Image: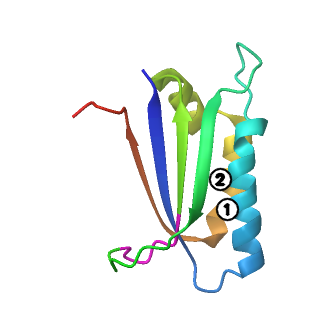
Amino acid sequence: MAVKHLVLVQFKADTSAEVVKETSSRFLGLKDGCIHPTSQKQYIKSITGGKDNSNEGAQQGFTHAFVLEFESLEDRDYYVDTDPIHQEFKAFVGPFIEKIIVVDYSEGEF
C-alpha cells in the first residue's frame, strides 16, 4: 500500500530567499540520497514540492508544500525515524522553520 507524506512548511520571517531555495533543493534531493539499508536502493518513489500560489487566503502562514510517496508504511517509518540522510536534513532545516505540518495518508482510505 503506497503512502503519501505531505509536509507543509512556514519558514521563519528572517530566513533568506537563498536559504529557502537551498532547503527546497536539499529536500527534493532526498529522493536520490535516501538509500534503504536492506535493498541498498532508493526507496522514496517520488518527491514534488513548490511555493504556495493559492489565492484562497487559507494558508495560515505556510509558504511551501512537499509531497513524498513511499511504497509502504515500513519505508515511510524508516524515513521518518531512522534514515541518516533524512535525520541530517532535519538538523539542517530545523533552525529555519517557524511551523511545520505533516500528514500521511494512503489514497482511497477514509
Q: Which residues are magenta?
A: 59-64
Of the 4 image quadrants, the one containing the N terminus is: top left
What is the CA distance from the residue labelled 1 to the residue labelled 2?
Answer: 5 Å
Task: Give the number of callouts.
Answer: 2
User: What type is the residue that disc 1 sits on?
Assistant: Val
Tell me if label 1 and label 2 are in contact, CB under 8 Å. Answer: yes
Q: Is residue 46 left or right of residue 37?
A: left
Quadrant (top left/top right/bottom left/bottom right) for the C terminus? top left
The residue tagged 1 is: 93
Q: Is residue 107 above or below residue 54?
A: above
Image coordinates of residue 63 in percent, x first then y, are: 51, 72
- For residue 11, side relative to residue 2 (left or right): right
Is residue 98 a member of the stretch shown in magenta? no
Judging from the image, what secondary structure is the residue with disc 2 in?
Answer: helix
Whether 60 is among the magenta residues is yes
**Residue 90 bears which disc, if any?**
2
